[in-house]
Image: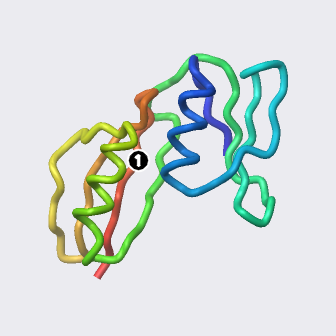
Amino acid sequence: MTFDSPTPDDLAAFWTSVLGMVETEREDGDRWVVLSAADGTRRIGIQRGTTTVGSVHLDLTCDSGEFAAELARLVDLGAVVASPPRHEPYGSIVNLTDPDGNRFDLCAYR
């Protein structure tokens, strides 16, 4: 998966913190950044470009007992709550955006 971003370094720092990944590749300053799992598997690319809101949608999951703390952690890292958390029959969900406005959800399934 690749994100376009006007600020690749900032977006890379956000997703590195959120997902516990490491930067494993970089080209031309901040033109291209690759984030990988701890074992070196490439997971996310970030390239310098314009953001088109709605072009990507990720669902992150956590245990139901960790939902509030994980939401607070994501907001502390720079995520913005796009709509209030909801509690549905399948579990809890909150819609968020990353620092570039890309939407993603935090889900705690029952």
Q: Position of residue 79 (x, y in %)?
A: 35, 40
Dot 1 falls on a residue whose secondary structure is: strand
Q: Position of residue 36 (x, y in %)?
A: 73, 53
Q: Give the residue type at disc 1.
A: Phe
Question: Which residue is under mark 1?
Answer: 104
Q: Quadrant of residue 80?
A: top left
Which residue shows up at 48% across the image and 51% down it?
18
Q: Position of residue 35 (x, y in %)?
A: 70, 46
Which residue shows up at 77% across the image and 53% down it?
42
Q: Quadrant of the C terminus?
A: bottom left
The correct choice, above or below, for 103 with respect to 36 in the image is above
Q: Is residue 13 left or right of residue 37?
A: left
Which residue shows up at 84% across the image and 26% down it?
27
Q: Is residue 101 left or right of residue 108?
A: right
The correct choice, above or below, for 52 with respect to 24 in the image is above
Q: Is residue 38 left or right of residue 14?
A: right
Which residue shows up at 70% across the image and 27% down it?
47
